[in-house]
């Protein structure tokens, strides 16, 4: 078995496995993700997403991720850490393309990304795709500018880049405060965070917010591969990793 397959098996020992082109694909247990089981939301809701391998998939990898969409000419070097930087084409995940199919289309939105969302073209495209899935009220509140986390300096939500892994719960808290200053108040139980990395989800156990690991059906080591899917975005209360019983 290849190293990729071995890693995959250790992460998804309870799942059916398929290794394609050295990448791990898996299927969630039947019934694990049920959009109809969403908790009732008493007031305004907030959905906060990571970017790389959550709203995006691995660049140009359509043969493995056929439901994703490549945008030729929009550069993206997310998770390509070589020097000089290697850029692929921005590839929207099934989740980003189908955000309007999830409960989040009725919510307000924030971004807490470890990556930098390469270049202005990618940032503009992300905002256009996100905004088209939201209500007019929620889309109009989103700024067109993004901010980066800097050492010892607070970042300006709600579109935050270069967040530190394992501390995104702090970024989400700042996003909640940003909306409160604009007259939109969320109960903690109506705040939902989605990310492909387990470590970023586990940090939410110290909060009253909800968090869920996604891109569970396709993995590339500790990160997602194809990115999230609409079926994974559910309003179930709690903190969940891939493979957790719902």
Image (tube, rainbow, N blue to C red):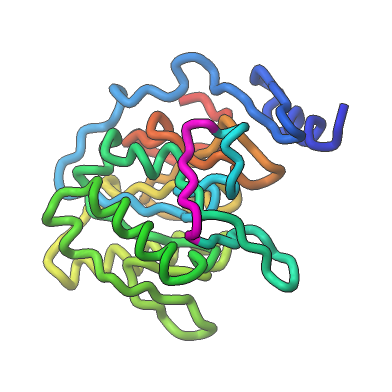
- Is residue 50 visible in the rendered structure shown here? yes
Determine the residue located farthest toward the front in the rendered image: 73
Relative placement, left or right, of 142 versus 214 is: left
Name the residue rendered at 39%, 60% in the picture: 111
> Residue 91: x percent and y percent?
50, 48
Image quadrant containing the C terminus: top left
> Residue 63: x percent and y percent?
61, 32
Magenta: main secondary structure equals strand
Determine the residue located farthest toward the right in the rendered image: 1
Please tell me in which quadrant of the rendered image residue 128 appears: bottom left
Name the residue rendered at 35%, 34% in the picture: 234
Write down the region rendered in magenta: 66-74
Name the residue rendered at 35%, 47% in the picture: 192
Please tell me in which quadrant of the rendered image residue 180 appears: bottom left
Relative placement, left or right, of 180 versus 161 is: left
Magenta span includes 73? yes
Image quadrant containing the N terminus: top right
Magenta span includes 212? no
Vertically, is 29 above or below 96? above
> Residue 120: x percent and y percent?
42, 71
> How many numbered discs sit on the rendered protein?
0
- Is residue 203 visible in the rendered structure shown here? no
Relative placement, left or right, of 218 versus 70 is: right
Name the residue rendered at 37%, 50% in the picture: 209
In this view, the residue in front, 2 or 90, is 90
């Amino acid at each position: 078995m290849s190293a990729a397959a071995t890693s995959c098996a250790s992460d998804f020992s309870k799942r059916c496995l398929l290794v394609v082109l050295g990448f791990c694909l898996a299927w969630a247990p039947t019934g694990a993700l049920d959009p109809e089981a969403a908790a009732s939301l008493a007031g305004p809701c907030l959905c906060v997403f990571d970017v790389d391998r959550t709203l995006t998939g691995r660049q140009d990898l359509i043969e493995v991720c056929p439901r994703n969409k490549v945008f030729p000419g929009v550069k993206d070097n997310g998770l390509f850490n070589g020097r000089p930087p290697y850029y692929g084409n921005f590839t929207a995940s099934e989740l980003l393309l189908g955000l309007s199919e999830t409960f989040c289309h009725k919510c307000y939105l924030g971004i807490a990304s470890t990556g930098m969302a390469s270049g202005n073209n990618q940032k503009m495209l992300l905002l256009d795709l996100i905004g088209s899935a939201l209500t007019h009220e929620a889309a109009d509140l989103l700024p067109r500018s993004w901010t980066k986390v800097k050492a010892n300096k607070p970042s300006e939500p709600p579109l935050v880049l270069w967040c530190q892994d394992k501390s995104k719960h702090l970024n989400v808290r700042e996003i909640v405060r940003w909306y409160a200053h604009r007259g939109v108040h969320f109960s903690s139980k109506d705040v939902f965070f989605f990310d492909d990395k387990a470590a970023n989800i586990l940090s939410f156990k110290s909060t009253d917010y909800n968090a869920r690991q996604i891109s569970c059906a396709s993995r590339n080591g500790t990160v997602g591969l194809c990115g999230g899917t609409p079926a994974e975005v559910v309003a179930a209360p709690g903190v969940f990793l891939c493979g957790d019983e719902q």
